[in-house]
Amino acid sequence: MAQALIEVLNLEVRYGGIAAVRGVSFAVEPGEMVCVIGANGAGKTSTLKALARMIPSSGEIHYDHLRVEKMLSHELISKGLALVPEGRGVFARLTIRENLLMGAYHRNDTADIDADLDKIFVMLPRLKEREKQLAGTLSGGEQQMLAIGRAIMGRPKLLLLDEPSMGLAPIMVEKIFEVIKGVAAQGVTVLLVEQNAKLALEICSRGYVMENGRITVADTSANLLADSRVRAAYLGE
Ligand SMILES: Nc1ncnc2c1ncn2[C@@H]1O[C@H](COP(=O)(O)OP(=O)(O)OP(=O)(O)O)[C@@H](O)[C@H]1O
Ligand SMILES: [Mg+2]
């Protein structure tokens, strides 16, 4: 896949004696929306953290024509790779506006930053209404929106999302997924990790199933949704 935006070859993540990711290979092409589904402890978060260089790993990571395994996470952010972490990681004691601006800390195009902030407030009006409120006082769903907004402020090419639906009521999950679709429609490539397999497969064109640190199935969303094993294990059918 010469034209992949990100390609991972034989990725491994270890925590002491525990092998959390055991030789994973996959690729995402520009403009694609791809998901990784799998049970608790399968290694999904570890995979995303390794891609964002937040934890050490072995194997090759090719991103935007660069070998990035030796890079630091902030270098990757400035190259357009953004991670919205599991549990959101907003800065509780900063305001909504300050949190959003943190997402643009590596940019110096002040006028464009202001314009992007305005765009995000149009896309996420709940955040506009609460612009000066401390992020720690937001509801879980609003914090998830803020975490996505903050990532968008970095003008990412590749957005990694770790369980954006976690702990949210169905109506809020629907809203968050609408936002993610909107971001993808603007041309941002999306790699989505989700335990909510049904929703993830509905918005992504392809998916990977991760089990015990390995990718065990890779297919189109339509095929995965029809696969009896996937249905039994991940769709509760
Ligand atoms: N910091 C850590 N130290 C030790 N082991 C860890 C650490 N982080 C993760 N692990 C272990 O690595 C394995 C994979 O964890 P990971 O968080 O990547 O799974 P996951 O697929 O994201 O799970 P979940 O769906 O519950 O978020 C688990 O067995 C976990 O206990
Ligand atoms: Mg996880």
Image: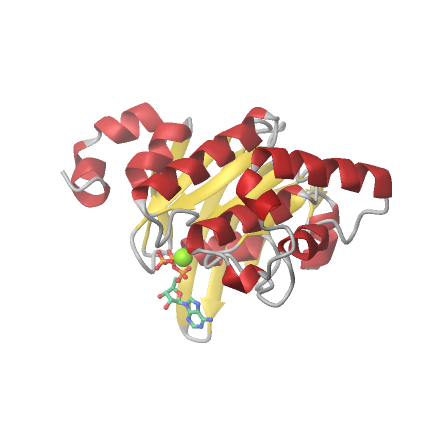
> Which residue is found at the position 58% from the left and 34% from the top?
123
Where's residue 43, x and y in %?
A: 40, 57
The number of discs equals 0
Q: Is residue 68 visible?
A: yes
Q: Is residue 8 visible?
A: no
Q: Residue furthest bottom?
A: 16
Where's residue 41, x and y in %?
A: 34, 60
Q: Is residue 143 above or below residue 187?
A: below
* Quarter of the image with the N terminus in it: top right
> Which residue is found at the position 57% from the left and 65% from the top?
92
Corner quadrant of residue 231: top left
Q: Is residue 2 above or below residue 80?
A: above
In this rendered view, identify the residue nearer to me: 208 or 25.
208
Q: Is residue 95 above or below residue 165?
A: below
Where's residue 136, x and y in %?
A: 53, 64
Q: Residue furthest front?
A: 129
In this rendered view, identify the residue nearer to me: 35 or 29.
35
> Which residue is found at the position 13% from the left and 38% from the top?
237
In this rendered view, identify the residue nearer to me: 69 or 165.
165
Q: Quadrant of ligand 1?
A: bottom left
**Residue 210 in the figure: left or right of residue 26:** left
Where's residue 113, x and y in %?
A: 78, 41
Instruction: Check the image and tell me how it is coloured.
Output: secondary structure
> Which residue is found at the position 35% from the left and 50% from the top?
168
